[in-house]
Amino acid sequence: MNRASTDPANAPASGPSGDPANATPSGPSGDPAPGPVTDPVRDPWRDVMRIALAEADAALPAGDVPVGAVVLGPDGAVLARAHNEREATGDPTAHAEVLALRRAAVATGEWRLTGCTLVVTLEPCVMCAGALVQSRVERVVFGAPDEKAGAAGSLWDLVRDRRLNHRPEVIQGVLGAECAEQLTAFFRTR
């Protein structure tokens, strides 16, 4: 059972770069529609991914890789948010996903985050994918794929390994170009 899907907004239209995030919606006459259009039913993840992108920016002052994560409760409310803090804390496990999951567990008083969604700017690594499985989140939504270390479909597919007792749904590519650009800009200065 492959439950992966892509950002539903990626199909209908694309902007000049071919990225749907840069698409210009048009009205019935073909003229550009006024302002950005977000359909929370067909495209429920973009607004939360923007929160994750803003959270990722908070990693920059400490020199951490800008990755941001947000955990939503079953009702869609934000339970926790975090950014990478490895450089800031000297903790090799201080990835945005792990920190957000820990904070969500504290907020709910329960290590099982059943019905919750983790939204993250970069595809989770093996450690973070393992934490997602162990925390029992219902789904993981990520922006940019990680061809070098991704464990939610790019290099490995740990989160959907049939041998494991829990397999969250994976939604990929939400604001993927924006998420990738944030990382590219960071590494360009290194």
Image (tube, rainbow, N blue to C red):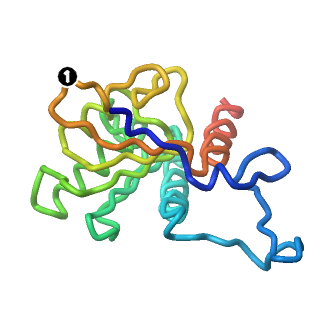
**Residue 17 seen anywhere in this rendered image of the structure:** yes
Q: Quadrant of residue 4?
A: top left
Please state the horizontal and vertical placement of residue 82, each as a whole percent of the image.
38, 53
Please state the horizontal and vertical placement of residue 120, each as a whole percent of the image.
44, 47
In the rendered image, the residue lying farthest to the bottom is 34
Q: Toward the viewer: 129 or 183?
A: 129
- Tag 1 residue: 163
Does residue 56 appear left or right of residue 9 in this picture?
left
Please state the horizontal and vertical placement of residue 18, each as a whole percent of the image.
78, 44
Label 1 sits on what residue type? Arg
The quarter of the rendered structure image containing the N terminus is top left
Above or below, 178 relative to 46: above
Q: Toward the viewer: 118 or 60?
A: 118
> Residue drawn 34% across and 67% down?
78
Q: Toward the viewer: 40 or 99?
A: 40
Q: Quadrant of residue 3?
A: top left
Please state the horizontal and vertical placement of residue 23, each as a whole percent of the image.
76, 58
Above or below, 78 relative to 104: below
